[in-house]
Amino acid sequence: LLSVLKLISPKEEYESSAGLAAFVKLKNPGRSGPGMINHNLADVHQPAYAQAVHSLTPASFFLVGENIPGNEELVRQMAKDGHLIGVHCMAHVDLARQPIEKSVEEIRETADWIEAVTGKRPEYIRPPYGSWSTELQERVSMTPVFWDVDTLDWKSRNTARIVKHICKNAAVHTVVLMHDAYQTSVDAALETIDTLTAEGYTFVTIEECLID
C-alpha cells in the first residue's frame, strides 16, 4: 500500500473511508508549510487492510499481482472505500534490471488483474526498489511514484522506531515508504496516523496530491 500525507488547514479536512496510509495535506503551525508523506504497504495478502478499516484515512495501495488471486474481495473493498489502487509489479523484481519486454509484461499483467477485479485500469505504479528507466517510461503509460523517506520497516520491525522516524521526518512534500507484510509496520502506520492527525495532518490519495 502506498499512501501520502498532504498539509492543509484544519478547516479543510478531507474524510474518506478506511485505509492504512495516505497522502496527507496539512498546515501545521509547528512546521514549515504544506507537505506530504507517503506510506507504502504493498503486500495485499496481509490482513493489514482489514485491521485498519475503522480509520478515516484515504490510502494508495500498490499491489503485488501474484497476491491478488484469492484476495479479490479485499481488493474490491479497497476500491469501494475510495482508495487509490496502483501497480507494484506481478512479483517483487527489479524492473529496470531485467529484459524490458519481461518488465512490461509484469506491469501489464498486474494492471490486468487490478482492472478485472475493480473495473478500473490503474494509472500509477510504485516500482520495486524505486528502480525505473527512461525505456520503461516510454513503454508504460503509467505515472511512477517514488519516496523521500525509507522507514526500513522491513529491517527494524520495531513499531516505536518506525513511528519516531516518520514523525521526525514529516515535512514539506515528504513521501514515506512502508510495507504491510509486518504487523509492526501496520501498528506503526496506525499510530502515525493518530499522531499526525492530532498535529493537524489530513490524508488524501496520491492522485489528489499530484493534481493539487
Image (tube, rainbow, N blue to C red):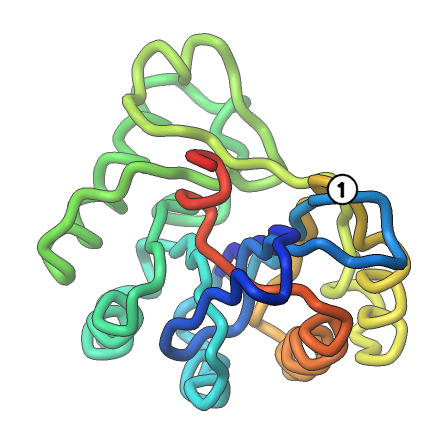
Relative image position of residue 68 (x, y in whole percent): 28, 65
Q: Which residue is mark 1?
A: 172
Residue, x 40% and y 69% (percent of image)?
44
Q: Position of residue 85 (x, y in %)?
A: 33, 55
Residue 21 figure quarter = bottom right
In the rendered structure, which amino acid carries the disc numbered 1?
Val
Q: Is residue 4 left or right of residue 80?
A: right
In the displayed structure, 14 sits above or below 6; it is: below
Vertical placement of 62 versus 203: above or below?
A: above
- Nearer to us in this view, 5 or 164: 5
Residue 15 vs residue 21, the one in the foreground:
15
Residue 75 in view here: yes
Q: Secondary structure at mark 1?
A: loop
Identify the residue at image location x=80%, y=61%.
166
Please indicate whether residue 208 sits to the left or right of residue 36 in the image: left
Q: Front-most of 73 and 17?
A: 17
Looking at the image, which residue is at 28% across and 22% down?
A: 141
Q: Residue at coordinates 32% horizontally, 54% vertically from top-left? A: 65
**Residue at the farthest front position:** 11
Quarter of image, res 69: bottom left
